[in-house]
């Protein structure tokens, strides 16, 4: 039977401490990005019509030219509650909360995109969501 030596304990403690480095890195990275606010940018025909802060619970209605979309913001998430389009795809999309996620209603050319306020970080690029006109 082999006995545990003092050197074995030192190596095990070192490896255990080393395993926490990724956790510490990810935690500080998340804290650095936590000062950004998420916004829901609402566009119709690729023109911004409303910016909704996801930190404030609200219900907002877009009703123009017979096109109606009702958005709800709750608990830092957004979804389309109601729409008068035929396919109802935008309503079925569900809740969105992460930057880069989108909700689209093609019949109304209605787009909701989640973005972070502040400077863009590497990998968080702007994307042109131009809707195709028939």
Image (cartoon, rainbow, N blue to C red):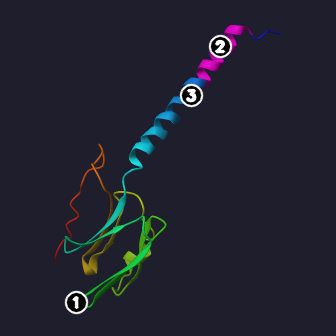
Q: For the residue labelled by badge 2, is the local secondary structure a helix, a strand or a loop?
A: helix
**Mark 2, other Cα within 10 Å: few <14 / some 14–19 / many ≥20:** few
Q: Considering the image in quadrants, where does the N terminus appear? A: top right
Please provide percent x and percent y for residue 29: 42, 40
Q: Which residue is tagged 1? A: 65
In terms of sequence position, does the residue under pointer 2 or pointer 1 come before the other?
Answer: 2
Q: Is residue 65 above or below residue 42?
A: below
Q: Is residue 93 left or right of residue 106?
A: right
In terms of sequence position, does the residue under pointer 3 or pointer 2 come before the other?
Answer: 2
Image quarter of residue 10: top right
Image quarter of residue 5: top right
On whether residue 32 falls in the magenta region, the answer is no
Q: Which residue is tagged 3? A: 19
Tell me whether circle 3 and circle 1 mark residues in contact (CB < 8 Å). Answer: no
Alpha carbon distance from label 3 to label 1: 59 Å
The magenta segment: 5-16
Kindly identify which numbered label has been placed on residue 93: none
Alpha carbon distance from label 2 to label 1: 73 Å
Q: Residue furthest left?
A: 133
In terms of sequence position, does the residue under pointer 3 or pointer 1 come before the other?
Answer: 3
Q: Residue at x 42, y 49 (%)?
A: 34
Q: Which residue is tagged 2? A: 10
Q: Residue furthest right?
A: 1
Q: Residue at x 24, y 54 (%)?
A: 126
């Amino acid at each position: 039977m082999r006995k545990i030596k003092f050197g074995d304990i030192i190596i095990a403690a070192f490896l255990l401490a080393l395993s926490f480095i990724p956790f510490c890195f990810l935690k500080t990275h998340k804290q650095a990005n936590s000062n950004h606010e998420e916004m829901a940018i609402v566009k119709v025909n690729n023109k911004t019509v409303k910016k909704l802060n996801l930190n404030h619970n609200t219900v907002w209605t877009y009703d123009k030219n017979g096109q109606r979309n009702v958005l709800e913001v709750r608990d830092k998430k957004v979804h389309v509650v109601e729409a008068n389009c035929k396919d109802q795809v935008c309503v079925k999309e569900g809740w969105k909360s992460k930057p880069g996620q989108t909700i689209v209603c093609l019949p109304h050319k209605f787009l909701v995109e989640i973005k972070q306020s502040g400077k863009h970080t590497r990998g968080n690029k702007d994307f042109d969501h131009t809707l195709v006109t028939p």
